[in-house]
Image (tube, helix red, strand yellow):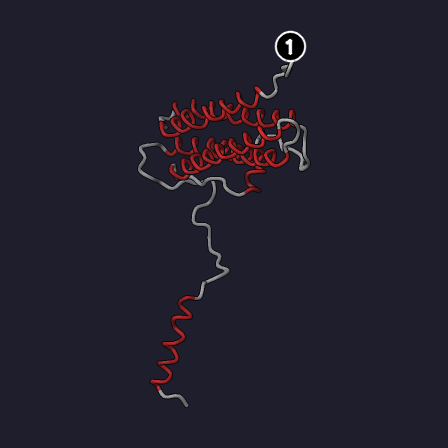
Amino acid sequence: MKTKSALDSSVAREAPQREAQPLLNQRGKVIQPYGTLVHYPLSLSERARSTSVEALNQILSDTVFLRDMYKKHHWQVSGATFYQLHLLFDKFFEEQSTLVDLLAERVQTLGGIAIAMPNDVAEMTKIEKPPRGREEVPVQLSRLIEGLAVILKSAHEAVKAAQANGDDGTVNLLSSDVIPTDELEVWFLSEHLVDTPLVRVK
């Protein structure tokens, strides 16, 4: 039979191992349900914050979807303009990734819950879903332009609502980051669909 001191030594040797053991497979209650707001002293009404959060989450879901469509086309683009579009699509993927963070952080700043998971994005997005297979370059470009147009429409509507509600932070994000970025991408992509001769004028 072990003495008390021997038992204490045994416990002491085992304690660090127990403390270092990760507590795995944890689950718990949702601490903030989706669609609810926590209160921060932002000098904005609950109505103003709720309206902006709803609009921003729609723009966020569409932006995540568009971002991932850029990566899909980055991988699957083909033809004579492969190299240029391969690089351009990846550049725009990075730009949209930046917007995703800004949009999500604004939702959280307003006390909301930002859309995050792919299944939720797929359910919410207003952008037409492309097939799994590879499409021709003009179709890829058209899909991206149409997706940007969807986001721009929502962004302009959200700016008007945020202005009316005195939500200057949301107005600034959409007017200074989302709209200019997406408008520039529309221009760049659209120019690739102009039917111009390569070596001889018509």
Residue 87 position, x and y percent, is 55, 32
Q: What residue occupies the far top of the structure in this picture?
A: 202
Q: Amino acid at mark 1?
A: Val
Q: Front-most of 175 and 158?
A: 175
- Indicate the quadrant where residue 108 lies: top left
Q: Front-most of 192 and 66?
A: 192
Q: Is residue 4 left or right of residue 74?
A: left
Circle 1 sits in a helix, a strand or a loop, which is it?
A: loop
Residue 37 position, x and y percent, is 41, 40
Vertical relation: 32 (above or below) 163 = below
Q: Is residue 39 left or right of residue 86?
A: left
**Residue drawn where x is 39% and y is 73% of the image:** 15
Q: What residue occupies the far front of the structure in this picture?
A: 199
Instruction: Give neighbour class at mark 1: few <14, some 14-19, many 20+ (Cα, 10 Å).
Output: few
Vertical relation: 169 (above or below) 105 = above
Residue 158 position, x and y percent, is 45, 26
Q: Is residue 65 left or right of residue 163?
A: right
Image quarter where the N terminus lies is bottom left
**Residue underneath mark 1:** 201
- Indicate the quadrant where residue 122 lies: top right
